[in-house]
């Protein structure tokens, strides 16, 4: 799938990338729900899009099958770094 800017237009997707970049570690979805300005369904939808674009990965976290650790892929880190640079220049 070719990455087009339209795939990232949802504000929640951009917020997720920047949040994960600043955390510099895996986080659980509940952390994203609490720290990203978006409804639960928007976060879930954005995570699906970001995963299809190979920008984030979700891995089983511990023994609970429903808990996932979400982190940036290398490609996601590169995109998120650029987004934080853009954000810094807007201030």
Image (spheres, rainbow, N blue to C red):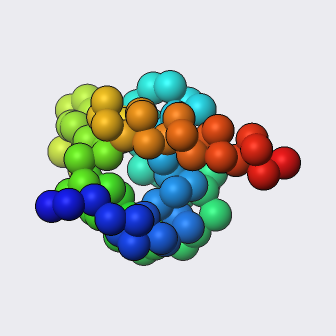
Q: Which of 20/6 is in front?
A: 6
Image coordinates for residue 71, horizontal then vertical, percent: 36, 36
Which residue ends up furthest to the left in the rendered image?
Answer: 1
Which residue ends up furthest to the right in the rendered image?
Answer: 91
Which residue ends up furthest to the top in the rendered image?
Answer: 24
Left or right: where does residue 71 sit relative to residue 52? right
Q: Is residue 73 visible?
A: yes
Q: Which of 8/69 is in front?
A: 8
Q: In the rendered view, would you say 66 is above or below 62?
A: below
Tell me the residue at 50%/25% (across/down).
Answer: 24
Tell me the residue at 41%/65% (across/down).
Answer: 5
Q: Is residue 40 visible?
A: no
Q: Which of 58/8 is in front?
A: 8
Q: How many marks?
A: 0
Q: Would you identify the image quadrant in which residue 63 lies?
A: top left
**Quarter placement of the N terminus:** bottom left
Image coordinates for residue 33, horizontal then vertical, percent: 53, 57
Tell me the residue at 33%/65% (across/down).
Answer: 4
Tell me the residue at 31%/30% (across/down).
Answer: 74
Q: In the rendered view, would you say 29 is above or below 85?
A: below
Image coordinates for residue 55, horizontal then vertical, percent: 31, 45
Left or right: where does residue 87 sit relative to residue 55? right
Left or right: where does residue 12 sit relative to residue 75? right
Image coordinates for residue 42, horizontal then vertical, percent: 46, 72
């Amino acid at each position: 799938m070719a990455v087009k800017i339209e795939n990232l237009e949802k504000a929640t997707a951009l917020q997720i990338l920047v949040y994960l970049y600043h955390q510099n570690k895996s986080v659980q979805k509940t952390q994203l729900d609490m720290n990203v300005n978006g409804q639960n369904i928007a976060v879930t939808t954005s995570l699906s899009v970001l995963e299809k674009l190979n920008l984030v990965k979700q891995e089983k976290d511990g023994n609970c099958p429903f808990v996932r650790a979400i982190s940036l892929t290398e490609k996601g880190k590169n995109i998120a770094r650029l987004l934080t640079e853009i954000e810094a220049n807007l201030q």
